[in-house]
Image (cartoon, rainbow, N blue to C red):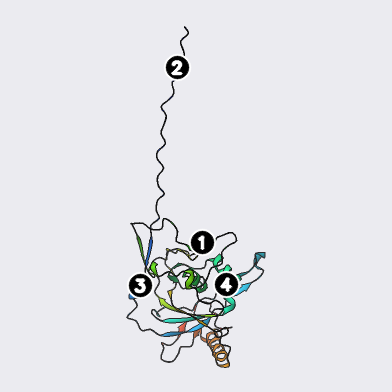
Amino acid sequence: MTPVPHHHHPPRRHSPAPQPPAKRPKLIINSTPVVDSVANLPRYHLGSMVYNPSGNSNASNKGYSTTHSMLPRFEGRENCIFQIRIPRRYLYERERAEVCKRRWLWGSDVYTDDSDVLAVLVHLGKIPPVLPDGIEPELVLAPQPGAMEDKDKEINGALPASAKSTPSGYVNINKDIIVDILILPPLEKYSSTVRNAIKSRSWNKQHDGMSYMVHEVKTAEPGEAEGRGKSMRKQRLNEREHIRKWGTLPGREGEGGLRTLVGREAKVGA
C-alpha cells in the first residue's frame, strides 16, 4: 500500500481578544482659584463697546468672512466688569456660521482677551451654533460616549463643567444681546474643549494679554445695543474722539478712571 502523506501545519495562532476602547478622561474645569485670586480687588464698571466686526463678502472668493472687534487693554483691571453690546444683525445664521467656522477662541469658560465674544457665547451654549451641511445636531450636541472616567483631569481656571448650558438655555437671538464680562488675569494655559458643536483652541504659552469670563448675558430690544438715541450717539462720538486723542476710553466718574487701549485696535460704536 502506498503510504498516505501527512501534511504538517504550523500551530494555529489565536488572535488576542479585542481590547475595549480606552475611555477618554473627563475634563473638569475649575474656575475657583482664578476668581478667588482677584475677589479682594475693587470692582468697577469699565464702560462698554458695540460688537462691530468688519465683514468681507468676497474674501478670496470664499464667501463671507469677518474680523471681530478686539477688546481694549485691561491690565491692572482684574475683577472689573466691561460690557459688550451685540446688535441683532450679528446673530443671523450667516454670521454665526462664520463664527463657528473660524473658532476664534482660546480656553474653556475663561478665555483669552482676544477671543471672539460671539464664539464664546456659542461655546457656552448661550446662542445656537450653525452646523455644516450633513451634520446631525444630535451627534454634536448630545453628551459623547466615553467621556466619563474614574481618573479625572482637573484644569484650574474656568467654570465647573457642570455649569455648561444646553440648547434649551439659548437666549432670544431675535433681539440684541448685552454681555457683561469679568476681567481676569492671564492663565498659565488655556484648555480646548468641544461644547455646543464648537471646539475652542488651546494655548499653552504665555499669553500677552488678560483673560475674561462671561459674567451675565441679557437681551434688549433691537436697536438698544447701538443706542440709537441722541444721547447714546453723542456718547459714542465722544468716546471715539477721546480714543483718537489719548488712546483711551474716558473713565466714568468714580469708577476707576481710564482704560488703556494702546497697542490694541478697538471699535467703539458705529
- What is the spatial separation of the Cα atoms under label 2 and label 4, in whole angstroms? 78 Å
Residue bearing the label numbered 3: 34
- Crowd class of label 3 (few under 14; some 14 to 19; many from 20; radius 10 Å): some
Q: Are marks 3 and 2 in contact (CB under 8 Å)?
A: no
The residue tagged with tag 4: helix, strand or loop? strand
**Mark 4 residue type:** Thr
Image quadrant in which you'd find residue 25: bottom left
Sequence order check, earlier mark of 2 and 4: 2
- Which residue sits at x=67%, y=68%? 58
The residue beneath circle 2 is: 6
Instruction: Please state which amino acid type lies under the numbered disc 2.
Output: His
Q: Position of residue 270 (x, y in %)?
A: 59, 83
Task: Please identify, in this view, whether the residue under mark 1 or under mark 2 is nearer the observer.
Answer: 1
Please tell me which residue is depicted at 55% across the width and 93% down the height of the picture.
231
**Between tags 1 and 4, which lies in front?**
1
Give neighbour class at mark 2: few <14, some 14-19, many 20+ (Cα, 10 Å). Answer: few
Q: Of the two numbered discs 3 and 2 on the same chain, state the one appearing first in sequence.
A: 2
Q: Amino acid at mark 3?
A: Val
Distance CA(mark 3)–CA(mark 2): 77 Å
Residue 72 in picture, x, y percent from top left: 49, 79
- The image's mark for residue 138 is 1
User: Sequence-wise, which precedes: disc 3 or disc 1?
Assistant: 3
